[in-house]
Amino acid sequence: MDLTDLTLSEALRALRARQISAVELTEAHLARIEALEPRLGAFLTVTAERALEQARRADERRSRGEEAPLLGIPLGIKDVLCTEGVQTTAGSRILEGFVPPYTATAVQKLFESGAIMLGKTNTDEFAMGSSTENSAYHPTRNPHRLDRIPGGSSGGSAAAVAARMALGALGTDTGGSVRQPAAMCGIVGIKPSYGRVSRYGLIAFASSLDQIGTFGRTVRDAALLLQVIAGHDPMDSTSVNAPVPDYSAALSGEVTGVRIGVPKEYFVSGMQPEVEAAVRAAVAHLEALGAHVREVSLPHTDYGLPIYYLIAPAEASANLARFDGVRYGPRFSDGRGMWEMYRQTRGKGFGSEVKRRIMLGTYALSAGYYDAYYLKAQKGRTLIKRDFDRAFAEVDVIVTPTAPRTAFRLGEKLDDPLQMYLEDIFTLPVNLAGICGISLPCGYDAESLPIGLQILAPAFGEEKALRVAYAYEQSTDWHTRAPAYLEN
Ligand code: GLN
C-alpha cells in the first residue's frame, strides 16, 4: 500500500496502532513530492532534512508512550507564515532570502501537537490573487488537469493536499484564498471566523480580513487541524479569548431539522451551468437528509467586490510600507540616496499585481479621497455584515457555490485583473462580515474538474458549518476521488 493514499485521520490511526512510523509516512510524502513537484510546482521550499528529523522525534516520543493530536503527521505550510530558520518569501522577490527569527503561532501549535513540516507552499505574491500565477517564483498547476490553475492564493497548499504530497496544509484566506483553491482542487478548506486563529507571524495582507485556515482531503481532517491552531494568543490582540469547542463532536452525520438558507443573489448570470446544477443538487441532497431549506436574501452582495477592493488594498498599502530594503530581503541601490534606494527596491521587489494594490490603496486613503472611498467602503462593509446577521436570524447555515466556475486555464485571466477579481464574488463577503465558511467538493464538470460547495455559519459557529459539511460528505463519495491525472 502507498502510504500517501491514507487520509490524515487514517494515517493518525495507523501511527497510533504502531502499524506505520512517522519516518515511513514522511519518506513516502517526500518521495511523492520529488516525483510530482517538477510538474505541479506546489512548493517554494521543501525542507526534507528537517521533516525527517521532526519525524524521528515524533517516533521517539511515541515509543516513550507519549501521544499528541498530530504526532507524526506531515503537512505543508503556506509561505506567508513565518517559520524560524526556514526561508519565508510570501511568494515575493522582496522577501527572497528572508529567514524569520520566529515561528507563527499557528505553525508553532502544529509543531507542539507533533506535526511535521514538509515545506513551504507556493502562493500568489503577498496572497494577492486567485490562481497562484502571481507568485514571483513559478505558477502551481492543478493536479486534476495540468493546463489549469489550482486556484489561489493558497494554490500550493491545495494542490499539495489534492496530489497527496501532504496529508493537510495551512493556508490563509483574506477574500477566499483557502475556500476557492479547495474548490478548484476538489478538497476541503476551512476559513475560520475572524479572531478564531492567531495571526501572529502571518505576513499581513489586509489585517481586518486575513485569517489562517486549513486544508484536508476530508472534513474531519481539516477540522482536526483547525482544532489545533484555534484559540487565543496574547501575541495577537484580535484573536478572541473564547473557549475552542470540540469540533469532532459536530461530526455526527446528523442534519435533521438544521435550517439551511440559499441566498438568491448567489446564482448569477454568467456562472457555469454545471456549477449551479451541482450546488442545487447538493442542497436537494441535504434536504433529503432531513434539513429544512429556504431561500434567503443577502441584498448587498453586489457591493461586496468593490468594497473589498477598497478595503483590502488600503490595508495592504499600509502593511507593505515596511518592505523598503532596509529591514528585510534584498536591497537595490545605486548609491543615489535613501529615496532612490526605496524606489529601486520596491520597484524591482514587488510584482505588478502588488503594485496595483498599493496604488489603489494609497489613493483610497489619501486626503480628500478617504471619505469618498475608504469610509464609504467601511459603511458598505457594515451593510454586508447586517445582511448576514439578518439571514442567520432565520437559518443555521447558508449554502452557496464557492466559485462561479471551475478551474480556468493558466494565463487565461492574467491580462484582465477584473476577471480575476470576479473569481471571488461568493467568498469575499464572508471575510468582510468576519464569519466562517467551509468549501467541500460537490461534483465534477464535463472536463473532470471539481466543483466546490460553500457552507457558511455565523462568527464562531464553525461547528454548525462542520456538521452540515460532514453529513453531506459522508453521504456522498466526491471526496474519495483522486485527481484523474494521478491515476495514470
Ligand atoms: N483573490 C482575492 C485577492 O486577490 C483574495 C485573496 C486572499 O484571500 N488572500 O485579494
Image: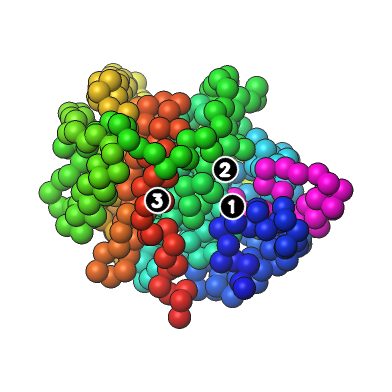
Residue displayed at 30% across by 31% down: 257
Question: Secondary structure under badge 3?
Answer: helix
- How would you rate the neighbour count of disc 3 (Cα within 10 Å): few for under 14, some for 14-19, many for 20 or more? many
**In the figure, 34 relative to 15: above or below?**
below
Judging by the rendered image, the residue that carries numbered circle 2 is: 224
Q: Quadrant of residue 411?
A: bottom left
Residue type at numbered disc 2: Leu
Question: Secondary structure under badge 2?
Answer: helix
Tell me whether the residue at label 1 lies in contact with that at label 2, contact meaning CB atoms closer than 8 angstroms.
Answer: yes
Residue type at numbered disc 3: Glu
Judging by the rendered image, the residue that carries numbered circle 1 is: 9
In magenta stretch: residue 408: no
Residue type at numbered disc 1: Ser
Q: Quadrant of residue 304?
A: top left
Q: If the image is split into quadrants, where does the C terminus sit?
A: bottom left
**Near-viewer residue (92 or 307):** 307
Q: Is mark 2 within 8 Å of ligand 1?
A: no
**Does residue 131 show up?**
no
Sequence-wise first label, 1 or 2:
1
In magenta stretch: residue 75: yes
Question: Secondary structure under badge 1?
Answer: helix
Judging by the rendered image, the residue that carries numbered circle 3 is: 473
